[in-house]
Image (cartoon, coloured by chain):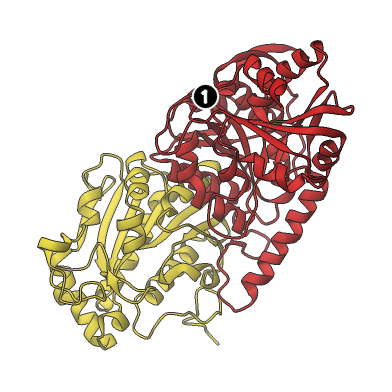
Amino acid sequence: MKVIYKKPESLTDNITIYCPGCGHGIVHKIIAEVIDELGVREKTIATAPVGCAVLAYDYFNFDVTETAHGRGPAVATAIKRVLPDRVVFTYQGDGDLAAIGTAEIIHAAARGENITVIFINNAVYGMTKGQMAPTTLPGQKTTTTPYGRDTSYHGFPIKVCELLSTLDAPAYIERTTIENVPEIIKTKRAIKKGFKYQIENKGFSLIEVLSSCPTNWKMSPSRALEWVGNVMKKYFPTGVYRDKFKEGN
Amino acid sequence: MKKVLLNGCEAAGEGAISAGCKFYAGYPITPQNRFPEYMSWRLPEEGGVFIQAESEISAINMVFGASAAGVRAMTSSSSPGISLKQEGISYLAGCELPAVIINMNRGGPGLGDVTPSQSDYFQSTRGGGHGDYRTIVLAPWNVQEVHDLTYLAFDLADRYRTPVLVLADGMIAQIMESVKLKPKKKKFPEKKWALTGCRGRKPNSIKSLFLTPGVLETHNWKLARKYKKIEEKEIRYQEYFSDNAEVGIISFGTCARITLEAVKKAREKGIKASLFRPITLWPFPYLQLSEFIKRAKKILVVEMNLGQMLDDVKIANRSNRRIFFYGRPGGGVPTPEEIFKEIKKI
């Protein structure tokens, strides 16, 4: 009998706490497949954020540490500096990375730390049940913007890829989505590139994935994916924002 | 053993290096600036990593990362910076990660000033961060001891898998004294729990989150047993002129050093004074101090603050002696003469 498909070795058999239609499961699986394909599971060390992915150490079948809210890039910086031959990545949500942990991500990127950052942007604080995130869209209703995000009162969303692209050090920055299969394939390609760059000592990479949160958006899973593609992507354009080592560069 | 002339920051740095510290992250703040400056070249020379972090918060979380990876790691700061590190210290305690934190205490509250103070006693010994945890606190009184205790701090941190605080002050940070350097440590405990990649073993995880009902309570009881063991085994203190005294004085750190001069002067003048100096502020030497108190007629507590260790002395005062207090807050440093006057007064 020929095995044509199996669960990646880098995922455990644990059942996740993620809601139906949540994007975290898709991205976890992509990361696990990439780690397997690159053959680095036994030398990978990840940081789990505070947020919905807080229990990532239960789902990934390699070494993972908890971090305080937003501090993943600081923790990962130190792990990579003391164990430079390991593969180190942070997994972070929008509240973790673009609000409470803004200083840590900017400075890890500015130092050009040779780590990979997986940034899940679903425009809302998921774990705490749907408050306004730093990436909540103008007009978007959340539990703390019940009349919609009024930019004159709450300010504007933060565009992380654009912001970090102003720095000299980062090697690779790309924004992708999980809205459909072709985009998921592109996301996997981007995440794999991020890890490959690290393994090749090319420096800091960040992949921002526009993801869905049907529960807090109060949408069906399919409607949520449409919203990622039709609404989120307009405010957060996908594409490569930095690739220092692009063929032909 | 050779002696070298160092200031307190450099002596602590050499203590860390002798103890096998291979990671330092810090942020500039007076009066401990000489510490990151010294480590910035000295640690890489020894094959270690120095990072000037973007904030105190980032620095303590870098220490968290290096410690999680199994490396002896430390940070240093002064009072306002230590306040910012408290969340990280709480995570280190909860995750049972060893780490060494040095506080060159300056005056507070708020931005305060940059002169020596002991105003962080409460913060150091009562947690500082959130949650039910304890931090070992070592209080050196001179440059030699900041070297020795920094070295010891790494061993204690590894032995008990817990953060250890060295509480010195702006005086110890900046004065220069001759120091007998400790030989470099060669044997280190194995850290099977560390995150190094799961080759040949099951994956490790480090966490302080326990959502299943009852599991956090079990974890806290485990920490409690560890803290009890530390209380049983790690108490350190010194007594000077500990025979039956008219005035028994309790003081720690720089202040104890100044007080000893006053005690000697009192002895010269025929007043039977004695000094008790806790070296571990947590675990606090309650039993030993209660014996000291029993042997003295009157008790005087001298601190460079408004009376913080005073609370612990009151707990240890099982023989109901009358306790007098002399303190200088806000960066005030008493002279031996001042303390001698207080001794005469009571």
Q: Chain of mark 1?
A: B
What residue is pinned by disc 1?
B332
Q: Quadrant of the C terminus of chain A?
A: top left
What's the amino acid at mark 1?
Gly
Identify which residue is drawn at 44% across, 48% down. A74
- Report if residue A228 is visible in the image: yes
Q: Position of residue B322 (x, y in %)?
A: 74, 39
**Label 1 secondary element:** loop
Q: Position of residue B306 (x, y in %)?
A: 56, 36
Q: Nearer the viewer, residue A199 or A84?
A: A84
Q: Position of residue A36 (x, y in %)?
A: 49, 66
Farthest residue in the right direction?
A: B243
Judge left or right: residue A218 versus residue B176: left
Q: Quadrant of the N terminus of chain A?
A: bottom right
- Position of residue B119 relative to residue A202, above or below, is above
Palette colour of chain A: yellow
- Position of residue B229 relative to residue A49, above or below, is above
Q: Nearer the viewer, residue A163 or B26?
A: B26
Q: Position of residue A29 (x, y in %)?
A: 43, 73
Judge left or right: residue A72 versus residue A23: right
- Report if residue B282 is visible in the image: no
Identify which residue is drawn at 30% across, 71% down. A185
Which chain has been coloured red in this picture?
A: B
Identify which residue is drawn at 46% across, 80% down. A17
